[in-house]
Image (tube, rainbow, N blue to C red):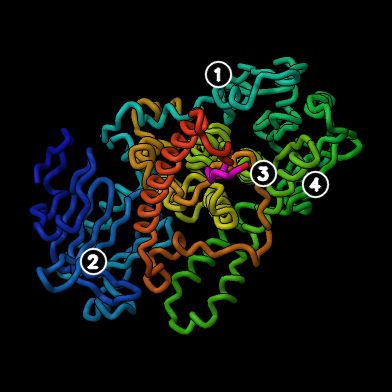
Amino acid sequence: MDSSKNGQEVPKNEIVETNVSNAARSDMEPLVPGEQVYIALLKDVTYLCPYMGAISGQLIITNYKLHFSKPSMPEKETSFVVEVPLCTISRVEKVGGATTASRATDGRNPYGLEVGCKDMRVLRFVMRQESRQRRMVYEKLQELCFPVSNKMPFFAYIYKEEYPEEANGWMMYSAKAEYHRQGLPVEGWRFTKANSKYELCDTYPQLLVVPSPASDDDLKQVSQFRSRSRIPVLSWIHPESQATITRCSQPLVGIGNKRSRDDERYVHLILEANPHAHKLLIFDARPQANAVANVARGGGYEKSEAYTTSELIFCDVHNIHVMRESLRKLQDTCFAQNPNEDKHWLSNLEQTQWLHHTKVILAAATRIADRVESGKSSVLVHCSDGWDRTAQLTSLSMIMLDSYYRTLDGFIVLIEKEWLSFGHKFQQRIGHGDKNHSDSERSPVFLQFIDCVWQMTQQFPTAFEFNEYLLILILEHLYSCLFGTFLYNCDRERRKEEVKKRTKSLWSLVHKRKEEYLNALYVSAYQNHVLLPVPAVRHLDFWSNNYARWNPKMKSQEPIQERHKELLKIRDYLKKKVEDLERQLAAKQLSPSGGPKLTVHSDAEPLAV
């Protein structure tokens, strides 16, 4: 292989046996634009598959991915492939030593490498000690998997795929266009550019919507009393009642029981903007005990004596550390090595508390949506800093209330708005390019949100335009760093790093392959419906197609994706038939000899009247 491919010189001493066999390359996906092979080990490498045992094959490392394959032999057996993007790898460790080299394939303590991944996989590779390959592979993986730690660029800056201009994902979201779609500005709410240079709050977007009577100077005063200066701002407004969902961070009450008249007046303005409400509902995502504990650290919550026209509701969603531990237990359960663990599957799943946490998040979001829709109440949502649990609750409740967010394009807009523009710390929560895999800032906050969306698609299978393959794709590239979409912690950082100018958007890929991510059961008649899922564990499912897709014992045996494609073709055919029949009916109605008048209902079924 040409070491200068794509204009990037590769040191020759870093390439081992780059003359990759045709068999190996036939099992390997074509290199993406900008990708090049750094290491290719064609022998003396064994993958210890936890389900199929030791598999000898070839290991290839590029500047984007790790690829292991057992080449298929003509008319004998199918190929075996393991592939993982390098930035999806969270840790690389040497295992085994000189005393274990002789039993390198028995799986007990082999000489080789263990690779832990953010998508829950743990890969173990065995290498012959005398080949001296382990050190070279280990050092190259340590370099390429952790670009932030090594002060190297993400592969997203090297990836040079060309997408058509009409599929440019960076053009999918415009804050002003989305607020205009909601009907803004309206009486009581205005746009402000007080944060155009990120001076008001460096983790908020540049364009904000705030109560009309509040001046930009008022916003500055309020920012001094909110954690990280994350003041209450508008996320969503009801098109009829003018009830709103606003978001912020906790007030800085502290042990001195401090108050801010500016903040209290500002919060009251949110209530006054809704003519139907007499109280503002403040949903604090945290358990009450956690909120009280935050007082000692300078934070706190809105006390009734200060916020007299508000009602405080605690939602009991636990913090990032509890959720991280829950995911670790889920990983252990999904990939248990003891065959006897199967009989304890349900009890082990329950002990992870993963579905319980999912239920609590959905219950809080459902309560918010119900109070906004049925009670015509305005709500203010926050947690501690307003970028984790807050984003979960605002975005989920908005999906329940607004059918636009249940379309493919609308769901993308929601993620761009509530998660990316409002500063969910993707860099820290995922650990992009950081070798410190035990960092306490890592947590599956966004994964939980996607899981909650999936749960809703199971309870309302015809209400969402997109399918679960879109959700899985989003999670894959949440970790991969192939696209710039989820890089960095906030809008300000992404602008500084020129993400839109120098990287590709994940949404470009989604639009290029849009048909793959459409739900064949989608019924557009749900457009005017509010969805209120049942937030009970007995109504929730374990998402095996995501969490257990690497475990062949738990993988679906049916070709579900192919069936989805067939259903889409059938649906398109039937829609065309309906349109043809409607045209024929319309023509008959216009003719003098037309039969009885027909009305076509929203389900496209013509009924006689």
Magenta region: 602-608
**Residue at the front extreme of this rendering:** 593
**Tags 4 and 1 touching, CB below 8 Å:** no
Residue identified by numbered label 1: 197
Whichever of callouts 4 and 3 sits on the residue coming sooner in the sequence is 4
Task: Based on the picture, tell me whether residue 604 belongs to the magenta stretch.
Answer: yes
| Cα distance in 3D space between marks 4 and 1 | 34 Å
- SS class, disc 3: loop
The amino acid at mark 3 is Val
Whichever of callouts 4 and 1 sits on the residue coming sooner in the sequence is 1
In x, y percent, where is residue 228? 65, 33
**Residue found 47% across the figure and 69% down from its top:** 334
Whichever of callouts 2 and 1 sits on the residue coming sooner in the sequence is 2
Q: Residues within 10 Å of mark 3 (few under 14, many from 20)?
A: some
In the foreground, 350 or 529: 529
Whichever of callouts 2 and 4 sits on the residue coming sooner in the sequence is 2
Q: Above or below — where is 270 with respect to 433? A: above
| Cα distance in 3D space between marks 3 and 2 | 46 Å
> In this view of the protein, can residue 156 be seen by the observer?
yes
Residue identified by numbered label 2: 80
**Tags 4 and 3 touching, CB below 8 Å:** no
The amino acid at mark 2 is Phe
Residue identified by numbered label 3: 530
- SS class, disc 1: loop
- SS class, disc 2: strand
In x, y percent, where is residue 500? 39, 28
